[in-house]
Image: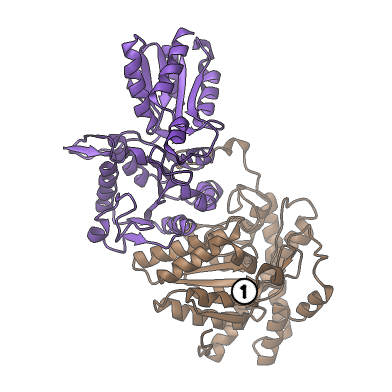
Amino acid sequence: MSTTYLEAIRQGLWEEMERDPNVFLIGEDIGVYGGAFKVTDGFYEHFGAKRVVDTPISEAAIVGAAIGASYMGLRPVAEMQFADFISCAFDQIVNFAAKSRYRWGASVPIVVRAPSGGGIHGGPFHSQNPEMWFVRTPGLKVVAPATAYDAKGLIKSAIRDNDPVLFFEHKGLYRRIKEDLPAEEYTVPIGQAKVVRQGKHLSIIAYGAMVWTALEAADQLAEEGISAEVVDLRTLLPLDRETVCASVKKTSKTLLLHEDTRTGGMAGELAASISESVFEYLDAPIVRVTAPDTPVPYSPPLEDAFLPNPAKVVEKARWLHRY
Amino acid sequence: MSTTQAIPTSPREDLSLAHKCLYYMSLMRELEDRIERKLYRQGKVLGGVYVGRGQEAISTGAALLADPCDVLFPSHRDMAAYLIRGISPGRILAQYMGRVDGVTRGRDANMHMGDLNLNIVAIISALAATVPVAAGAALALKYLGRKNVAMCWFGEGSTSLGHWHEGMNLASVQKLPVVWICNNNQYAYSTPMAAQMACANVADRGPAYNIPAEIVDGNDVLAVHAATARALAHVRAGNGPYLLECKTFRMTGHSAHDAAHYVPPELFDEWGKLDPIVRLEARMGAEGWATRDEIDAIHAGIRKEVEDAVAFAEASPYPDPATLMDGVYESQ
């Protein structure tokens, strides 16, 4: 039976809670209500109020309490109702959690789930991709799965990880994609990118929902005789530079794609890494397709103009191929 | 405000408690004097130095009541909590001097230190951030079915931050076992109480969260101890958090570089007369708990202990730059 991205996350959470009694959930409206997106629907009834903790509207307290509970040996999974609200918990994440092990050797095995991304007409405060605020914070791990398989495997790895993991799950994928998942248990390792489509003319590096945009673009490009390889980063920190550079060495042309805004985005870091490591293999400038440096607008024509899409990727890829 | 009935003790317990209090308060004072007035001026301690001179009764009186499995969250003027938990003066001085035998092995400075094996947690500089974390530790203690509590110290300045209010609220809504201890020294850097909050007392904030709150003479270590005993009785019985506001005064600038010209000098005179160590010594003499010679012998022992600690810290090496990248992650 096909499993949606949302159901995959839900299965991962459920399995880990069944496996380890120290795993618990904490967040707003996650218990009795089942979560704003219903990811945790039914958990409260099965696991009870002790393990599915409904909190006040209080992101700093949710993450702070998760950190404190993790010091005592528990494995909290905190939910930000929307990734946009993670800024309320910023100090707890970047100063308390991220630096704890380095400063005084205290591990912080927490997961912060953050439903992110646009395309749902959520406007400036329900559509953001705030992952890069955290990717430049040493001590954190940041994952952003694109597939149902990876979403389940990575949430399980995140819960078992002894460092703080931010789990950016793309809202636009929740019910849009589905696939058959293995019946047996599996995990997906944090820190490994994956080539999701082989190609020879150029590499498209993406993550999250943009992996699907890249694949759609690659289909169109194939009809024009352009063979695009697609790399799904899956984890943003620690970054798997090796897989990216190996793909660039193979195709010699690179298109970097993300839904996040441009300046200071992941593409900049990747471009620097590629330039440092495999410059000699490049046959063209590294190009970027990203959202522009604006807030995420609400009105559909504005949001459509803001978001990268297959047409924008195809246009850049054609230019890159001709170069 | 809650009731303030005394918890009965025997004369022998009083004597023993007074001796412990004098020892830890005086050890904290001697260590911080050494750090601020000598090692810092000698350039052996760099960066910021924040001492709790005149405030020793608050960490001492409260932490002496903690069970080893209670989790402590001291703030930066609460050194006695570390001493009581068993972190040695030598390691504390090595911490201030950035040496490998410091509690954070040179990774962080001054009172930014903790040890989970001793159930004592390190602050970050945005001090109010500790409050939700302490609530989370208390949540875990309850989750795990343990009878222990969290004890969390903070200054009055911390109570202006959102994290403080979020932590207080969550702890109360969830009825978590945590004792909140405000070390109210009346100045947050240069900002006096009146510019920090429009209420007269931090304890006034308790009722907003349905948390019982009590005002304590923070320069009377036995009063702090007795109030903490009441707080613990409430919290250990499963009634949720309890707030103690210990009124004291910061007898220094914010840090060693700050001459505190903004503090009216008469306040230093007034509060200097209420020094918690001098007061306890007077009480011990009056109660017949110690002679002057016995008290002098305690101080002499402490001075020797601190000399040894300085020698230990100075002999401790600086960290190897090759270890710079170690410990950012578990696998690194």
| x and y, in percent, of residue A33 in the image | 30, 58
Q: Nearer the viewer, residue B231 or A89?
A: A89
Q: Choose top left, top right, bottom left or bottom right for residue A57.
A: bottom left
Image location of residue A313, percent across then percent down: 42, 21
Residue nearer the viewer, A55 or B225: A55
Q: Vertical placement of A308 versus A173: above or below?
A: above
Camera sees residue B176? no
> What subunit carries mark 1?
B
Above-or-below relation of A48 to A112: below
Tell me what residue is drawn at x 36 percent, y 41 percent: A171
Asked if residue A161 is positioned above or below residue B158 in the image, the reply reads above
Residue A150's spot in the image, x, y percent?
A: 31, 35
- Going by the image, does B120 lie left or right of A220? right
Which residue is more in the foreground, A215 or A47?
A215
Q: Assign a secondary structure to mark 1.
A: helix
In the picture of the structure, the residue carrying the numbered disc 1 is B58
Dot 1 amino acid type:
Ile
The chain coloured purple is A
Quadrant position of residue B155: bottom right
Image hue for chain B: brown
Q: Position of residue A103 (x, y in %)?
A: 56, 49
